[in-house]
Every structure is written in C-alpha cells, then in structure tokens.
Image (spheres, helix red, strand yellow):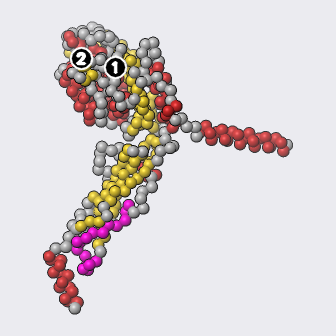
Amino acid sequence: MGKKIVALLMAVSIFWSMSEWCEGAYVYADELMLYAKSAVLMDADSGRVLYERNGYEPMAMASTTKIMTLIVTLENASLDDMVTVSAYAASMPDVQLNIREGENYRLGDLVYSLMLESHNDSAVAIAEHVGGSVEGFAALMNQKAEEIGCVNTYYITPNGLDATDGDKFHSTTARDLALVMSYCIKQSPQKEKFLEITRTPSHSFSDASGQRSFSCTNHNAFLGMMTGALSGKTGFTNKAGYCYVGALERDGKTFVVALLACGWPNHKTYKWNDTRTLMEFGLANYQYRGFEEAQIPENTFAQIQVTGAKSDKIGSVELIGVEPSKPQDKSLCQTEGLLMNREEKITVTLHKVKGLSAPVEKGQKVGYLSYRVGDEEWKRVDLVAAQGKEAIDFAWCMKMVFEKWSIS
C-alpha cells in the first residue's frame, strides 16, 4: 500500500510539473518559421508591432489595397447611391465582375463584389463614383492613410493592380497595412459595416435594370480557420506575390497579421500557414497588462515650492500640491493597458519642475509621467498644480508693512 501511495504522489508531482511547464511555454520571435518576405503581427487596440520581419520595407500590396478602398467608400458615400459604369472601369483585367459600360449598380452591391470576389472592375467603378476619378479617389486613400498614421504607403489604384507614378509605386509596408486593418475594425465610424461586409459568406444582386444577376462568394479561408477570426483580404499580382491581411479577436485580445510577398505560384497556401503561425504566437505569448500595475516614482506628488507668492507672513515658504490630469497628447496610445510578453515591463519616468515662480494658476502643468515599454512611450499623464498662488504686488507689500507696524 505504501509503495502505491508513493507512486501516486510521484505521478501527481510529474503531472503538476508538466502542467506548469506547458503553461509557461514561451516561443521566441526569432524561432518563428515564416514564408513571407515581409510580415507584421500587431496589437489592433494600440497599433503596437509585436513581431516584424522587414515590416517597414515598402512593397507591392496587390488586392489588400481593397480594405482601404472599402473604408474610404463607407466613410464618404451612401451605399444606396447608384453607380454608372464607365468604359475605363469595364476594361479592367481579371478578376472581373464583367460589368459593362453604361450599366447602373447600387453601390452597396458593388462593395460585396469588391471584397468577396476582389473584382477589379467594381473597384474602379466605385472609385470613380466616390472620388470623381481614379486619381481623385487615390487622393482620398492617401489622405486617409496619413490620418491613420501610415508613413510608407502610396496608393495609385483602388484595386491594387501594380502601377507607378513618377518615382513612386503602388506600395505599402506590412506595418502600415496592419495599421489600416486595425483602423478599419477598431476606430473607423464605419467599423461595424466594414466587418459585416467582409464577413458575409455570399451576396447576390442584380443591376438596376434587373436584367443581369450576380452571386459573390467570400474566398477568405481564414474566417473558417481559427476561432475568433474577424476579417481579412487576400491579394496577388506578379510583382506582389501572394499577400494577406487578417484580424482575429479572442480572450480580450485583437491581433492583426499583414503579409507581403508570401510566396508565388504554386504556393498559394503559404499565407494561411504564416497567418496561423503569427496568430498563435500572439495568443500564446502576449497578455494584457494595465498601466496601473507600473510603479510610479515616490516623489511624483510631492509639493512644489513657489517663490514670489503672497502669504500670511513675510518670508514664509509657499507650497502647492500636485495632482494628475487627463492625458493631453492624443498621438499616444491612451488605452489603460497594453499587450506585452512576459519579458517586457512598463517603466515610468517622472518629468517635473523643481520650483515655480508666482503667479501659479490651478491646473497649470508642472510636469508629466511617461509610461514606456522598451524605447517607446505609450502613455503620458500630465501633472498639474492642485491650487493657485498669486504673485506679490504693491498692495500686499503695503498690507504686510502695515501689519508689522501695528504689531510693533
């Protein structure tokens, strides 16, 4: 009986040790095996890059372009608009819906053609309607990219076909592409409609005359690959290779993967392998940690001495309290936390004046706390004066002199 108990205890101990090892298993970024020449894993809530391989190198993006085409359309036009097809739109190469010059379509139908089947002719018809011309629409795309924070993206076409404009070419980076998708699903006022369209399994419609009917099927295989898959867009041109951008939400975390030059024919499935690899890496290695967990310097709220301030007694030292204010720098991530791996930590640096000269107004900025992860600042909290102090003036001086003489 004693031997059985010992054996049972040993088995439990081994199982417990294995369980702890499994839960603590950590995958290092440099151990990831990917096919893509350029790849990024991003925290969609903060825009933080969690993993990148050549993620800042401008490259052709193919039909992943169309996520920007869709969001610009949703934010600048009504889906009930009627779109008249031009000869130029009808001339676009495959993949086509095969719309014809002079036909009319509801804009709300063409966006499904754009995203589910990636039709190039629909993209141009949409662009001409919303932007007045392809060039006008490209200007809207580039303006939106700049607003989002893209720094190495340049749009020329609404469908992603390879194109050049002087010394520039239709291009983005994996980082910028991930940032655009993050905007589409998290920040845009049309985010719900964007998700609805890109997640739709199929859509059928007719032209305005009712004489031609069409049916579009969603070809984004990622939607059925992983629990929590939100959205995505494939792309391919001879120059770009296979490309993909996709989003997943699970356990309170939202990840975006962007892949550029992820193989050429006959390697169409490489993008799915890389997407799964990066999503699983994110899910396994990153946890949400709140900024309130970070330790702030002890003297953060220590009082500040004010010189030249009115007081009840000549020569007395005047002090003001310090309190936190709401973050002012909207360019910084102002969420209450960040996805971090176990090796990262939040450091808080205090920037605060040593003293002030009166007058001091209540709410006047006296410093700030900088919350950083690595070399990047993610949150800033201003420190302000908790009360005001008036400066010494002639009337105060006369009052002090009079009070001193009275006492004497």
* Mark 2 crowdedness (10 Å alpha carbons): few <14, some 14-19, many ≥20: many
Q: Is residue 66 left or right of residue 222?
A: left
Name the residue beneath numbered marker 2. Answer: 125
Q: Residue at (27%, 69%) from the top-left corner? A: 306
Specify the segment rendered in magenta: 300-316
Q: Nearer the viewer, residue 150 or 252?
A: 150
Rendered location of residue 256, percent (x, y) = 41, 31
In this orientation, does residue 208 appear? no
Q: Secondary structure at mark 2?
A: helix
Q: Secondary structure at mark 1?
A: helix
Residue 232, picture quadrant: top left
Rendered location of residue 342, percent (x, y) = 51, 43
Q: Is residue 115 above or below residue 363?
A: above
Where does the N terminus fall, quadrant-wise? top right
Where does the C terminus fall, quadrant-wise? bottom left
- Residue 62 image label: 1
Q: CA distance from mark 1 to mark 2?
A: 18 Å
Rendered location of residue 382, percent (x, y) = 32, 55
* Mark 1 crowdedness (10 Å alpha carbons): few <14, some 14-19, many ≥20: many
Q: Is residue 386 above or below residue 168?
A: below
Q: Is residue 305 magenta?
A: yes
Q: Residue at (46%, 22%) from the top-left corner? A: 35
Q: Mark 1 is on which residue type? A: Ala
Q: Is residue 236 above or below residue 15?
A: above
